[in-house]
Image (tube, helix red, strand yellow):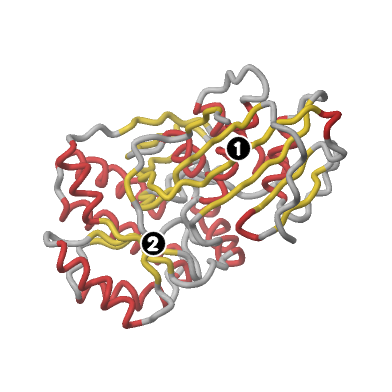
Amino acid sequence: MGHPSEPSGTPLRVINSVAPIRICDNGGWTDTWFAGHGVIFNIGVYPYVEVQIKVYPARSREERVVLYAENYGDAYTVVPGNTQWIRHPLLEAAIEYMGIPDDISLHITVYSEVPAGCSTGTSASITVALIGALDRLTPGTMTAHEVAYAAHRVETDLLKLQSGIQDQLCAAYGGLSFIEMHHYPFASVSPIQVPNSIWWELERRLVLFFLGKAHQSSPVHEAVIRKLEEGGPEGAALDKLRQTARMARDAVCAGDWNVLGRSMSMNTEAQTELNAALVGKDAHLLIDVAKANGAIGWKVNGAGGDGGSITLLCGQTSSEKRALIRAVQEANPAFRPLPIYLSRYGLRVWEGM
């Protein structure tokens, strides 16, 4: 379905919001209820997800809320109070969670340049951006931390989904983050401050590759969860993942790229130890080609599984990085590099006409 015709007249307000996506999540799986406590290092990057809300008087439109999921070309009416969320449940549930004042109607556009199922926390980023924008319909008093936890509750309480907390926090805070979850789901975020020279060099060395298909891993994830439940929160597998997060934090602060690369690779090995299917055959192929062409680190993004994406850490020269990218694409033309830049900001919300 195409974009609906815009209502006549000038909107009362136009609210914009953006939030970064997440890559290189060392310590992932430890930010969950079955881990109990966790340590996560992750990186917020462009391209942002985007939300724009046009606000009109309620009397000017027959539909109270129109939602346009631009990536899918899907525009439709959302009825407040109807909890039969079918088309885009996460977006519809977030709208219901926040509530819509009775005296306005909304035209909401949601867009992401990142492919669906990329394992970069995109769904959490979209929910954070949408809740942040909807918060501006009222006095707009939610902090970034509160927005992140509201987005998490939409997934866990309203939709009854399994969800860690790191993706929402990365979307809210951006940048380089060290997250310590003291007791699920309560966590503190320590933004990692580094000199510009380290920031720029990290940005230059990173490459994000989409494996060409959305990750499909629910049965695998269920098996991993059962295994981790049996081992308990102090199990060796979870502890190894926590260690890679601390290792990555210390390496970035020191600008030690070889140690950062090892932390990423160790985390990917730990994912394989949880379940071999968390690192699929396409991921293994890409990693093998990357290693042969000078990569010093590789991290299967997110929880892993078939499809998704991989973050690579490259060596010292940019020409070698470009050669690596060409070699990976030649190995499988479906492997696609996605342009990324480190995000100095997390959630941003502003108004403009």
Dot 1 lies on which element? helix
Camera-nearest residue between 52 and 42: 52
Residue located beneath label 2 in the image: 338
Residue at 61 percent across and 49 percent down: it is 162
- The quadrant of the image that shows the C terminus is top right
Residue located beneath label 1 in the image: 151
User: Could you tell me residue 279's position as x and y percent?
Assistant: 42, 69
Residue at 33 percent across and 64 percent down: it is 269
Q: Going by the image, does 310 lie left or right of 14? A: left
Is the Cβ of the residue at disc 1 closer than 8 Å to that at disc 2? no
User: Could you tell me residue 171's position as x and y percent?
Assistant: 47, 40
Residue at 49 percent across and 57 percent down: it is 114
Residue at 47 percent across and 72 percent down: it is 212
Location of residue 280 by image quarter: bottom left
- The quadrant of the image that shows the N terminus is bottom right
Q: Residues within 10 Å of mark 1 (few under 14, many from 20)?
A: many
Dot 2 lies on which element? strand
Location of residue 54 by image quarter: top right
Q: What's the residue type where badge 2 is placed?
A: Leu
